[in-house]
Amino acid sequence: MADQSDVENALVAAVTFTLYPSGSSAASLITCDGVAATIRVYRGWPVAAALHADLASGTANVSIFPSGDPHATTRYPANWNVTTASKPTLTVSVAGGAVTFGGSTAAGQMAGLSVAGATYVYLIQSGDTIALVAAALAAQLIAAGLLVQISGATVTIPSGAELFARVEQAQSAYQETRRQRQSFRVSCWCPAPLMRDQIASTIDAAVAAMPFLTLADGTSARITLAGGATIDQSENATLYRRDLIYAADYATTLTAAQPAMVFGTGTLSSPAGILSPLLG
């Protein structure tokens, strides 16, 4: 699920990339008197002592801080949506009575065998190897009274029975339970007015070109301009500040795994509409 902190982190990442397109270890895009400016970008409100020390040394700060209270903007039905389907990294091939697993394993994937109409399925756990997957299925076959040979990641059933092998990957689904709108203040604290103008205009142009901001959970926040202000404090001749206020409309979500169906049939029987598999 997306949280206010996720929006702040995404804004920090977007502003940092805008000012340091070649990476934070390279020079910034902003130059003053032919010298690349040093700029700190961070979440939260600046600490006065640290800010004054940075300004005195010619270092600008850009802080991202929530502005005002969030309010609900929920307007979509609470439907379950499947995210982009991912393919299993485990592979399987059948040659005669030999079943060979390959590729790589990942928790949540399933490997299955169908022998003479009877099905056997193994749910892969974290740390399993392909040889362990083959051994787990072989153990099920042996328990069912079948003659089985195993060598590494290959299981051989010499009975000549009809044989199928499959691998599947569970998918992720999400439900939007609430949508909210929250404003965030992007404050440019600079030691010179020209630096302030360059930093603020560069950030604003970049944000205007990215109407949606991708968050950590894969959802997106709609970003719009909500205000701004220029503040030159006369009591501090080295502080030139401009605030850019952006509103983010983003979702709070629930996520769930949609189980994979290896063999058999399935029905949309759950209240949430998530596929309920029969694994044989």
Image: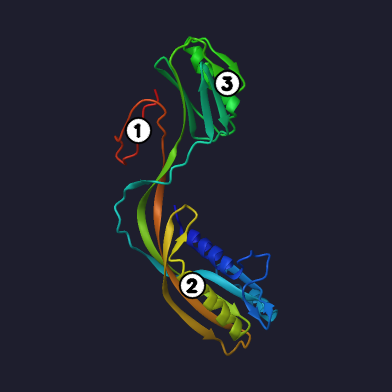
Disc 3 residue type? Thr
Disc 2 residue type? Arg
Q: Residues within 10 Å of mark 2 (few under 14, many from 20)?
A: many
Q: Describe the element under mark 3 as helix, strand or loop.
A: strand
Of pointers 3 and 2, the one earlier in the residue sequence: 3
Residue 276: numbered disc: 1
Residue 239 sits in quarter:
bottom right
Could you tell me residue 205's position as x and y percent? 49, 74
Residue 154: numbered disc: 3
Of pointers 1 and 2, the one earlier in the residue sequence: 2
- Determine the CA span between mark 3 and mark 1: 30 Å
Disc 1 residue type? Ser
* Left or right of 174 in this view: 148: right
Q: Describe the element under mark 1 as helix, strand or loop.
A: strand
User: Is label 1 in contact with label 2 (beta carbons under 8 Å)?
Assistant: no
Of tags 3 and 1, the one toward the viewer is 3
Could you tell me residue 187's position as x and y percent? 53, 75
User: Is label 3 in contact with label 1 (beta carbons under 8 Å)?
Assistant: no
Q: Which residue is mark 2?
A: 185
Of tags 3 and 2, the one toward the viewer is 3
Image: 235 above or below 47 = below
Residue ranking furthest to the front: 95
- Determine the CA span between mark 1 and mark 2: 45 Å
Q: Residues within 10 Å of mark 3 (few under 14, many from 20)?
A: many
